[in-house]
Image (cartoon, rainbow, N blue to C red):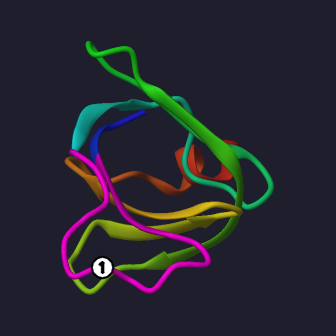
Amino acid sequence: MAPVTVRKLAVVGRARASQPEGPSLEGVLTRYPTVGRPLALYSGSGGMRTSPIRRVTPGKIDRTLLVETANSVYEVVLHEPVDREERALG
């Protein structure tokens, strides 16, 4: 999978903050974000794993996705384009 930067934008159930909730993490996704599966990122700092994804929507900027889980909303910036085959494998 392509390298990405993931940043937590908000916690579900709280008013959206003007500043991101946490630091940005750079790493590699295990698979393309898919509804019903967790967002999993491998990075040098240990990575992260979320609760199952509820919704994936394109962001305002090219190669950016907004990923909503049961607990949080994340911005995922893809550093390289992802082809349709990789998306289908998600």
* Amino acid carrying mark 1 in the image: Ala
Residue at coordinates 28% horizontally, 50% vertically from top-left? 22
Q: Report which residue position mark 1 lands on.
A: 17
Q: Residue furthest right?
A: 36
Q: Residue 6: in sight, yes or no?
A: yes
Residue at coordinates 68% horizontally, 42% vertically from top-left? 89
Q: Quadrant of the C terminus?
A: top right
Q: Residue furthest front?
A: 14
Left or right, residue 36 beside residue 9? right
Report the magenta residues as a range. Answer: 6-23
17 part of magenta stretch: yes
Question: Percent x, y for residue 13?
Answer: 61, 78
Q: Residues within 10 Å of mark 1 (few under 14, many from 20)?
A: few
Q: Residue 90: in sight, yes or no?
A: no
Left or right, residue 72 beside residue 2? right
Between 61 and 50, the one lying in front of the other is: 50
Residue at coordinates 73% horizontally, 61% vertically from top-left? 35
Residue at coordinates 71% horizontally, 63% vertically from top-left? 70
Does residue 47 lie above or below 55 as drawn? above
Left or right, residue 40 beside residue 34? left
